[in-house]
Amino acid sequence: MKLHGLELTDPFELTIKGRDEPIGYACPKCGAVFLVNKSSNERLYESRRKRKQEEAASHCVKDCPCGKPIEDSYRLRCRACRDQMEADRERALFEKSTKLAIEQYDGPLYWEGHCGGMGDGYFGDVDDLLDYCELEGVDVPEYVWACTRHDLRLDADCIVEHAVSDMYEDASDHVGQKAIDVLQAYLDAWCKEVAIVSWSSDTSRSILLREADTALTG
């Protein structure tokens, strides 16, 4: 099997006689067993099964393809290679992103590995980030990521379904659509009143911060 670009020996599949689905996997080298937790949810079971299959296949892989030893036994690459892969991934995202000048964006920013006024990686705006760089003696980065706003929203259908989950079968079917709509209208108004907002990084848009880089967008 192939994992993260590395060709691995398939692990041994463990099954119970008379059953098709595997209950676990064993490392092809040392025989260490990785059991799959049962679940009636097929998607969850498949996710667990795949993860245990990968863990078993990679259990005794100790050397990175670059030839250096792997520091953590559960990893498939050494730290230097992982850092390079991450840098390459980030650069590829940057190359594909829509590049904006400072004047074209107004809102929170994300800069991984730094602690902004809004928490790990998140800065309220460009001024917040520039103040941080000056205070910490850090060079202003070439670019940072824009952020996407997420307003609090509560879903009436999900709330009702959860509330009646321990009641009689099909209880949620006896709640009419009109009642659901009334509850949803109340929830929307309540969410608007409490005004809770979160932000996530948006790698489809990058903000160029240095003067020379900003000139490229003109």
Image: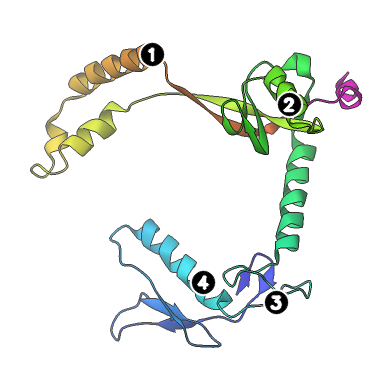
Establish if 77 lies above or below 15.
above
Kind of residue indicated by mark 4? Glu
* Element assignment for label 3: loop
Q: Secondary structure at mark 4?
A: helix
Within the image, what quadrant is residue 208 found in? top right
Q: Magenta span: helix, strand or loop, mainly? A: helix
Q: CA distance from mark 4 to mark 2?
A: 44 Å
Residue neighbourhood size for the residue with mark 1, other residues' Cα within 10 Å, grouped as few (<14), some (14–19), many (≥20): some
Q: Which mark is residue 192?
A: 1
> Which is closer to the viewer, label 3 or label 1?
3
Residue 183 covered by magenta stretch: no
Query: In this picture, which residue range is highlighted in magenta?
Result: 208-218
Q: What label does residue 63 carry, if any?
A: 3
In this image, 49 relative to 57: left or right? left
Q: Indicate the quadrant where residue 66 lies.
A: bottom right
Precedes in sequence: disc 2 or disc 1: 2
CA separation, marks 4 and 1?
45 Å
Q: What count of labels does the image hold? A: 4
